[in-house]
Image: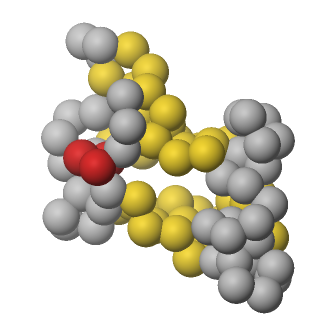
Amino acid sequence: MFGGINGKLYGSTREGGPLYSGTFFEFDPAGGFRMLANNGPYGAGGSQRGEVSVSSSGKIYAVTSSGGANGNGAVLEINPNDAPG
């Protein structure tokens, strides 16, 4: 887990979630957990690998080992402000 510029904590899982390919989540000490993105084996990417980083604008970046256009992984950009929930 790592701290965002907004005082909330962010993290990821390599597995689990509705599609069993990992999730990205936010933890707000005042409000609890919220899933930001559900990784899937198709399209956006699945099975997050390596470090997750946050930009000065608050967006989260990660790399996956599956999914993406050719099924060989993807670079994900997640904006916590646009996430459902």
Quarter of the image containing the C terminus?
top left
Residue located farthest toward the bottom when viewing the structure as drawn: 70
Q: How is the image coloured?
A: secondary structure
- Left or right: where does residue 19 sit relative to residue 30? right
The answer to which image quadrant residue 56 occupies is bottom left
- For the image, the number of numbered tags is 0
* Relative image position of residue 54 (x, y in whole percent): 35, 61
Instruction: Please say if 6 is above or below 68.
Output: above
**Residue at position x 78%, y 43% in the image:** 19
Q: Is residue 81 visible?
A: yes
**Residue at position x 52%, y 46% in the image:** 37
* Relative image position of residue 13 (x, y in whole percent): 68, 42
The answer to which image quadrant residue 72 occupies is bottom right
Q: Is residue 14 visible?
A: no
- Left or right: where does residue 72 sit relative to residue 31? right
Instruction: Please say if 32 is above or below 19.
Output: above
**Residue at position x 82%, y 41% in the image:** 20
The answer to which image quadrant residue 48 occupies is bottom right
Comparing 41 with 55, the one in front is 41
